[in-house]
Amino acid sequence: MLRDAALVCGKDLRIELRSKIGLNQVAPFAATVLLLFGLALGPNRQALQPAAAALFWIAVLLSVVLAVQRSFAVESADSARDGLRLSGLDPAGIFLGKGAAIVAQLLALEALLTVGVALLFGAQLSGGLVLLGTCVTASIGLAAVGVVYGVLSSGARVKETLLPLLLLPVAAPVLLGATKAWDEALAGTPGQAGVWLSLLAVFAVAYVAVGSVAFGPLLEGA
Amino acid sequence: MRGDRAVRALGVAALAGMIATVWLGLFVTPNAVGYADGTVRLLYIHPPLAWVMFIAYGMATLSSLLYLWPRTRHARFDRLAGASAEVGVVFTGLTLVSGSIWGRTTWGVYWAWDPLLTTTALLFVLYLGYLAMRNVPGDPDTVARRSAIAGLVAFLDVPIVFFAVSWWSLHQGPTIDLATRHSYVHGSMAWTLLLGFVSFTLTYVWLMVHRYRLAALRARESDEGLESALADRWAEALQ
């Protein structure tokens, strides 16, 4: 299963490296969102600094929708999904592989956005370990639930509008937990982020488990 | 259709119960001390609405589980899940509206970021998404399986959302704690509240029966519609 996951993950990341969609479209989109937040909240740094964590995670959440859509657009071209189904790879492995590829892309994006909030909003980056731990656990949760809803909506003709409606409400606890953990870290009290990190971990474990079981039947019907 | 008379009787009972609840709630029961003028009367509909919301989502989740379980897989559980989620969303909307009216008169605002309220609002959008997904056309078996899994994935989120929002509002400073508000319900008020629960539950069952029948008729129409269209084409070709 893990070998299958590594195969699928490698394939997805190779496609992304070659097509550069992530670099040319998703990353600039996230940067634009940050800039727009800055414009909307005004030039006052006193207003932007406390909101830095919230704006960071909203930008991530909006980018997840794009990353998931991209991950399944790749499979719908040239009926690649049928190939995937016929490949004999373990469905749980495919799920983990696609999820891992999204996690890798999200982490790269989050690194970029971290620089963005530090520069644009003047966020003081403290508690680096908590910041990193939050990024990792939140990305795993978001990718897991994203892949589940991605395959759910991939067969539908209205997938562009359906996916955000399905994904964003379910991801609400991640937005909450990650924002709060970042708030604590940025405020210089990373010790208080423990409860939020454990919430993110519970979310990630729950959806990785459900996704591994449910992905097979969902892929069949997609 | 089978059981028509029973369903009609159920509908009449639900309607009579509702009218009696309104009459008792608005005109017979006293105004309670400690409540803004008349707001206690929301007590007779708000908890029953929330109660129906819980049984509707519970039913939708149970039906989704039964559909996914290979031994009990049957289209009837898929229809049941869809019908129940639909009724659940309507009652969630009504719960939010009645809660907001209560909030306006008691707290002075339509919306407070209270854990229960916020969780209910998220539940509302979560199941709106579920219903939107159900309405996407496709092969009936695929749609049913997809919906059942989506129903469970959505339900799994509910406790996580609730804990997250509770901790979150804890960190926001004190909000309104419902547990410390001691209100004693007694006498005619208790009976009216009980009647509210019974008549709203009957309404739920009545709505469910009709939504379920509609879903079954739709499925039959698409089956038989195809067959009759095929028969027509054959007849044309053989002429």
Image: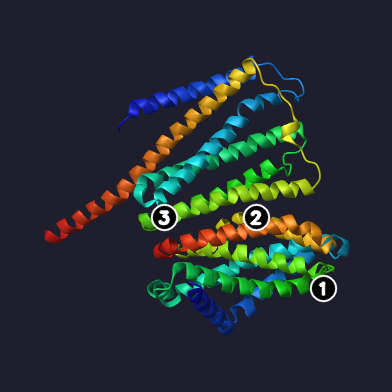
Label 3: few (<14), some (14–19) or many (≥20) C-alpha neighbours in 10 Å: many
Q: Position of residue A192 (x, y in %)?
A: 79, 57
**Amino acid at dot 3:** Arg
User: What subunit carries mark 3?
Assistant: B
Q: Is residue B105 above or below residue A158?
A: above
Q: Position of residue B146 (x, y in %)?
A: 44, 56
Which one is nearer the viewer's eye here, B100 or A114?
A114
* Residue drawn at point x = 37 percent, y = 39 percent: B213
Q: Which residue is denoted by mark 3 in the rendering? A: B145
Q: Which residue is denoted by mark 2 in the rendering? A: A172
Alpha carbon of mark 2 to alpha carbon of mark 1: how far? 27 Å
Q: Is residue B95 visible?
A: yes
Q: Is disc 1 placed on a helix, strand or loop?
A: helix
Q: Is disc 2 placed on a helix, strand or loop?
A: helix
**Amino acid at dot 1:** Leu
| Labels 3 and 1 within one chain | no
User: What subunit carries mark 2?
Assistant: A
Q: Position of residue B232 (x, y in %)?
A: 20, 54
